[in-house]
Amino acid sequence: MQRKGSRFLLLALLSLIVPVLISAAADRQTDVLQTSQGPLRITPIYHGSVMLEFGGKVILIDPSRGDFTGVPQPDLLLITHTHGDHLDREMITKLKKPSTVIVGSPAVLDTINARETVLTVVGSGEKKTVQGIEIEGVPAYNIVRGDEVPRHHKGIGNGFILGFGDARVYLSGDTDCVPEIKSLKNITVAFLLGINSPAVTAQCVKDFRPKIYYPYHYNRLNTQEIADALKDTPEIEVRLRKLEGDP
């Protein structure tokens, strides 16, 4: 009788735990963008992590730390730089399959150093087509001011522009609003991190004017304030999504 009671107690506890485990996956919101070569599915996941699905391919950018329950094994893994909230070796090992191609800068791939994995270098300013997806590296770094020591040095990491038919998707990684970002053209969808303040972030978005902007990697910045600062540019659609790992 005592054993049966213990079993019921265990089942009751599990019933409380399981919803917590699946809640992050249930809260994910996927948007579908129609391109000239078919639909592109866009799913923000965690902090700086985004999943893109196109033409039967699954592309994951910076999978790290969060709950990736239900996320399919990626065909492409793009890593923007070497910090632990972007390059998570344990998560990479957990998610990838034997045919997964990992894309990043030379510094990123040196850090991963996985001999059994296909690695493709795409550095800042480089363009390559990988598994049918055009990928362009965009510089991502901190501007040095006075005696400041930058956390993100030029040439170590980069953002990416991915081509899907007539759509171009930009993912910034960690960066200031550097000249190379301000000069971007014809961006359909942009994931730009929160930079210093809502006003600074909004101004950076205005500088290159994507059609659709998702704030991500915003830490404690108020994303509604970013959206409010962009109200005077109605041609930029702002999509606010709650990201696990950011308040």
Image (cartoon, helix red, strand yellow):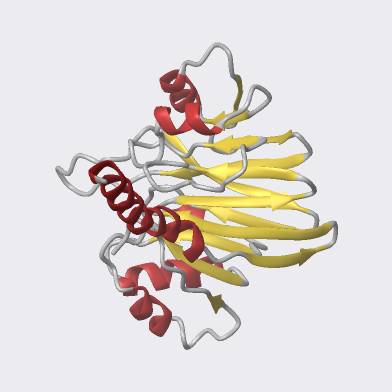
Q: Relative to residue 140, is residue 149 drawn left or right?
A: left
Query: Horizontal and vertical percent for residue 54?
Result: 74, 51
Given the current orientation, which residue lies at the most extreme front position?
1
Check the image and report above or below for 205 versus 73. below
Q: Residue at x 46, y 59 (%)?
A: 192
Given the current orientation, which residue lies at the most extreme right position?
37
Q: Residue at x 38, y 57 (%)?
A: 15
Which of these two is toward me, 184 or 234?
Answer: 234
Check the image and report above or below for 66 versus 75. below
Check the image and report above or below for 36 versus 142. below
Q: Relative to residue 49, is residue 201 drawn left or right?
A: left
Query: Horizontal and vertical percent for residue 101?
Result: 64, 28
Image quadrant occupied by the C terminus: bottom left
Check the image and report above or below for 120 versus 34. above
| Count of picture labels | 0
Given the current orientation, which residue lies at the most extreme top position?
115
Q: Residue at x 79, y 38 (%)?
A: 132
